[in-house]
Amino acid sequence: MRKMHVLMTNDDGYEAPGIKALASAISEFARITVVAPDRERSSCSGALTLREYISLKEQPSYGANIQVFSCGGMTADCCKIAIEGLLVNDKPDLILSGANRGYNIGTDCLYSGTVAGAMEGCVFGIPSMAVSLERINPEHFLLRACKFTVELVKEIFVKNQYKGTLNLNIPYMEQLTLNKLKLVDLGLHRYKNAIKVITDTDGNQGYWIGGEPEIEIEPKNTDIYWIHRNKVTLTPLGWDMTAYNEQKIIHNIVKNHVDEF
C-alpha cells in the first residue's frame, strides 16, 4: 500500500525542535519530505525571494521515512521550490507547517510564516494545516501536542479526505483529547507598546517592533477567546480576502463610476 507523502515546512528553521518532533510523529504512518528555511524566519508571512539565487541543501535525516532539505529562502519559497521543483514528479498529499513555538491566532496569521506555509497548499490545491503550540518549554508537552496532531491528521485528512487548509493552535494542558477542540473564526489580535525607539551601537536612532497582546473581550466564536480558555482551536482558511459584507456599501458609493458586467 502506498504511503501518504507529507511535505513539511516551518518558519523557525529546519533544526527547530517543533518540526523535528512533528515530522518524527507523522513518519510513523507517512513518508516525509522536509523543506524548511536554513535559519529563523519568524514573521516572514508569505514573502518570496524573487529573481535571486536560493540555496537548497540536503541535510541529515531526523529518522526513518524522513528526508530533510534546508532552503536559503523564506517559508513560501520552501513550499514553491518543493512543489514546483524538488517534488514536481512526487507531489505531496498533504502539507504540514510547524509545529511552531508560539500561537498563530487571529490577525497574527497575516504575518505568520507558519500559516504562509499552509496557505501555499491552499494556492496549489493541496490539503494543508499550520500547527502552532503555546510558547512553553517542557519537551513532554511538545511530544504530547505532536501525538494529538497525528490523531487529528488521521481523522481529518486520512479518514475523511479533507481537501482544505486549516490553522491549528494547541495550548498547554495535561490531557489533550479531540473533545478539547473548538472550531472557530479568526479573531482580531492587537498589541500594545508595539513600537519602541532604540539606538544602535553608533548612536543612530531606530525602532523596535514587539509589544504585548492587548487583553480584549473577543466574541465567543473566535480562536483568541477560546485559546485563553485552554481549548485547542481549529480554523478553516482560504486565499480569498474579499470582504463580501462590504461590497454593497462600496457599490453604493461608487455605483455611478462602476462598469457593470
Image (tube, rainbow, N blue to C red):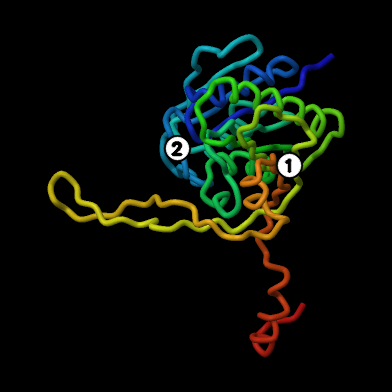
Residue 144 location, quadrant:
top right
Q: Amino acid at mark 1?
A: Gly
At which x and y percent is residue 8?
A: 61, 28
- Circles 1 and 2: CB atoms closer than 8 Å: no
Neighbor class of circle 1 (other Cα within 10 Å; few <14, some 14-19, many 20+) is: few
Q: How many marks?
A: 2
Q: CA distance from mark 1 to mark 2?
A: 24 Å
Element on which disc 2 rests = loop
Question: Which residue in the protein does label 1 denote?
Answer: 125
**Left or right: 196 as drawn, with respect to 257:** left
**Considering only vertical position in the picture, is 75 above or below 205?**
above
Q: Residue sitting at 31 percent across and 55 percent down?
A: 196
Question: Which residue in the protein does label 2 denote?
Answer: 41
**Left or right: 194 as drawn, with respect to 69:** left
At which x and y percent is residue 83?
A: 63, 33
**Considering only vertical position in the picture, is 158 above or below 183?**
above
At which x and y percent is residue 129?
A: 68, 37
